[in-house]
Amino acid sequence: GEDVLDEAMRDFEGFDHNAQTLRIITRMERVYPGFDGLNLTWETLEGVVKHNGPVQAKAGQTLPWAFRAFEGWDWLQTSTYSGPEAQVAALADDIAYNNHDIDDGLRAGYISIEQLLELPMVGTAFKNVIDQYPGLSTNRVIKEAVRRLIGYWVRDLLQTTTANIEKIRPETADDVRALDQPLVIFSKQMQDNIAVLRSFLLNNLYRHYRVNRTRSKCTRALRQLFDVFLDDPSLLPPHLLQQTNGPEQLEPARVICDYIASMTDTFALEEYKRLFSLDVEL
């Protein structure tokens, strides 16, 4: 979805999901009378912005519009790494989604245990479970192996980060930010194992032909939603249309982008049917 919206917004400053998250939590959520956004701590905002490390524009490029539009941008010290808590959260995200994808891919039948047995670390986890519990159901093999894999990643992260702390001896969060590399990291061996896993998932799961078909359909649906709203903004719900004339004077394209970005998969498909199918109630 992010790629579709970025392409659709090419003439309107583009779209970036981290930048969009910052907009949501600082401006777009409007539930309290005293302020827009969620009034989150500086450290939380920093963690969102620096989720992938220091934020700097690449040569010949500018930062995403939402970052540049944020009034406290310089205040977030974007040229440094984030504090330790945010670094932990970023790698916890990696642990969660990679292991979730193994589970999902197996259950969908896009990848097999036999394939995973060939991978370093992942294959060891599955082989150990199969050897320890002969005749165990496939469902339980998957659950136990993924549980152990998560444990491998967590223990490696703890051990490597603890060693870094003992070596560097930072005394404050700002000491961590001042480093020229993250404090919270996996070991070199674990990083190599993760790289092999990601390459496998890319080639065998994310690019599986059935996944490609689904992605292709969703890409067309999202682009058609964007185009039909841009051609006729009056099709937008009234509260969204009003934003183009509100205090921020947002471009219709940005309002449409915000709307589509906020949709769940199910809602996006329902909205598509409401706009393009004659058999669905409006």
Image (cartoon, rainbow, N blue to C red):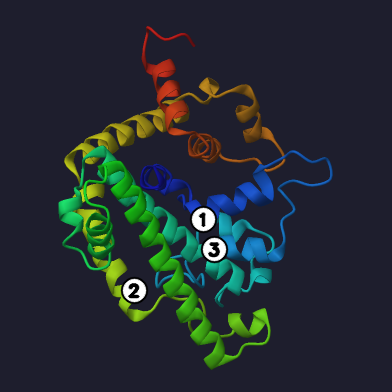
Contact, CB < 8 Å: mark 1 with mark 2? no
Rendering quarter of residue 73: bottom right
Tell me if 40 is positioned left or right of 14 in this view: right
- Badge 3 marks a residue whose secondary structure is helix
- Residue 165: x and y, percent? 56, 86
Q: Nearer the viewer, mark 1 or mark 2?
A: 2
Tell me if 98 is positioned left or right of 26 in this view: left
Q: Is the residue 132 above or below the residue 242 in the image?
A: below
Residue at mark 3 to residue at mark 1: CA–CA distance: 14 Å
Q: Amino acid at mark 3?
A: Ala
Rendering quarter of residue 41: bottom right
Q: Is the residue 88 above or below the residue 271 in the image?
A: below
- Residue 199: x and y, percent? 23, 61
**Which residue is labeled 1 in the image?**
18
Q: Nearer the viewer, mark 3 or mark 2?
A: 2
Q: Front-most of 20 and 224?
A: 20
Q: Amino acid at mark 1?
A: Asn
Q: Is the residue 236 above or below the residue 187 in the image?
A: above
Q: Which mark is residue 190?
A: 2
Q: Which mark is residue 89?
A: 3
Residue at mark 3 to residue at mark 2: CA–CA distance: 18 Å
Near mark 2 (Cα within 10 A), the count class, few <14, some 14-19 or many ≥20, is some
Residue at 68%, 83% in the rendered image: 172
Q: Earlier in the sequence, mark 3 or mark 2?
A: 3
Residue at mark 1 to residue at mark 2: CA–CA distance: 26 Å
Q: Which mark is residue 254?
A: none
- Badge 1 marks a residue whose secondary structure is helix
